Image (cartoon, rainbow, N blue to C red):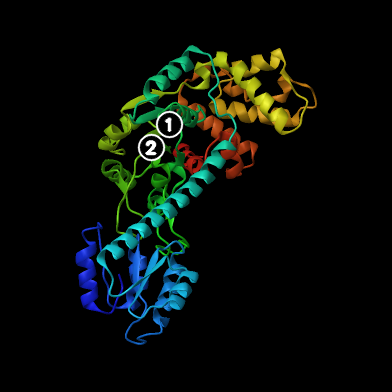
Amino acid sequence: MIDDDEDVLLAAKMLLKKQSHHVIIEKNPNKIPFLLNNDTYDVILLDMNFSKDITSGKEGFHWLGQILEKDPNAVVILITAFGDVEMAVKALKQGATDFILKPWQNEKLVATISTAIRLKQSYNQVDKLKKAKEMLEEQISKPFGEIIGQSTAIKEVFSLIDKVAKTEANVLILGENGTGKELIARAIHQRSLRKDNSFVSVDMGAITETLFESELFGHKKGAFTDAREDRPGRFELASGGTLFLDEIGNLSMSLQSKLLSALQSRQVTRVGANQPLPVDIRLICATNMPLHKMVQEGTFRQDLLYRINTVEIHVPPLSERVEDIPMLAQHYLQYYAKKYHKLVNTIAPEAMDKLKRYAWPGNIRELQHSIERAVIMTDSSSLQETDFLLSRSLSSSASANTLNLDEVEKAAIAKALQMHNGNISKAADELGLTRASLYRRMEKYGL
């Protein structure tokens, strides 16, 4: 509440602190920009006439404009002792939510503020739904929403999904790159009691240290240079639904601490704000990194690991579910034939044998890209063995001399870089990695 009459401010605070969690009063309207930068408010009570101009309301209209420029969704109730119908109508036309006269009746003031708070809550809900709708549309546009396979290895994963989905248990999904960890997370969400709410996915490996809090916890307009509007973080967007944190093993120790704090308190504070916001999420995490070993090495917090892995699901690599390759290959063939308007509907037996012999270091994602490339390049109605440019050195039979995953991964990365003449973006896409993930692996293997 901003008013230059200190007695009015104190009286209002005595009344309103019984109705609100937090009441801030201020005599000097010039501090309004500072207050708006420093916190978020459900309702702003603004006097229309200050000492410079006793009756015209010009100062009130000026500060109303300043507030709405800073936050178009601000809920502002204007107060004046010299109000009339004309001024009230003008205030509402310029964006005020309501108008009240001094001296007020306490019941009237409380009722007006209660109505305004409900309006603010509806604004917040609309904003959240808008952001969630954008994310949902992005999710719907992604192909292959179902897990495909009938192998014993994948059936064991199905069984775990069914057992854990209806619970609120935190789940940690472990597996190599390209094995479909996000599909597993989505399957858990779709079978859970939260299925009608948002599923929000975050690639932790792609978030920089400086943007971590803004991305996950949100920010206020003006909190930093590029913060042009208030923005809810991924925790807020996922509230009521499921939050999926992919590549969680890539977080630094400092970011692990911030994440753990939010998970333990079940609340977040937007960058540039002081008031924490409660969040209600079901947490699912995934990584291809050995978290238990990292705990022993001191590079991953043990208390964070305990927090995220009530249940662990290990997703098998494609090399352990070879019998699923024909079903997966046919699925991708149908999808890409339709996408690229190609009359391709079968895979020749020799070509399928080649696919089944290959080691697939990039797993299902590599198979998907291989089918897509073959569909684009073929001139036949059936994919042939020659349509698949797979490295002989990485076939199952040829790789029998080494089962070391690091060596296989290094060879795959080296081949991708060679195929694309050192183009990091294209090589990362080929391998199903982010640019940041590929850079880390190149550094790891000295490439």
Marks 1 and 2, Cα distance to the nearest angstrom?
Answer: 8 Å
Q: Crowding at label 1, few (<14), some or many (≥20) Cα neighbours within 10 Å?
A: many
81 or 53: nearer the viewer: 81
Query: Which residue has dot 1 on it?
Result: 288
The kind of residue on which mark 1 rests is Asn
101 or 234: nearer the viewer: 101
Q: Is residue 424 above or below residue 276?
A: above
Query: Which residue has dot 2 on it?
Result: 249
Is residue 36 toward the left or the right of residue 435 in the image? Answer: left
Numbered disc 1: secondary structure: loop
Q: Crowding at label 2, few (<14), some or many (≥20) Cα neighbours within 10 Å?
A: many
Residue appearing at x 27%, y 77% in the figure: 27
Residue appearing at x 47%, y 38% in the figure: 441
Q: Is residue 389 visible?
A: no
Is residue 202 toward the left or the right of residue 113 in the image? Answer: right
Residue appearing at x 41%, y 33% in the figure: 194
Where is residue 102? Give x, y as percent.
Answer: 30, 75
Quarter holding the N terminus is bottom left
Numbered disc 2: secondary structure: helix
Q: Is residue 240 visible?
A: yes
Is residue 92 toward the left or the right of residue 309 in the image? Answer: right
Residue appearing at x 46%, y 52% in the figure: 127
Where is residue 330? Give x, y as percent.
Answer: 65, 20
203 or 140: nearer the viewer: 140
Circle number at residue 81: none
Is residue 345 toward the left or the right of residue 35 in the image? Answer: right
**Which of marks 2 and 1 precedes in the sequence?**
2
Give yes or no for contact between labels 1 and 2 (Cβ–Cβ under 8 Å). yes
Where is residue 323? Give x, y as percent.
Answer: 56, 13
Where is residue 89? Give x, y as percent.
Answer: 47, 73
The kind of residue on which mark 2 rests is Gly
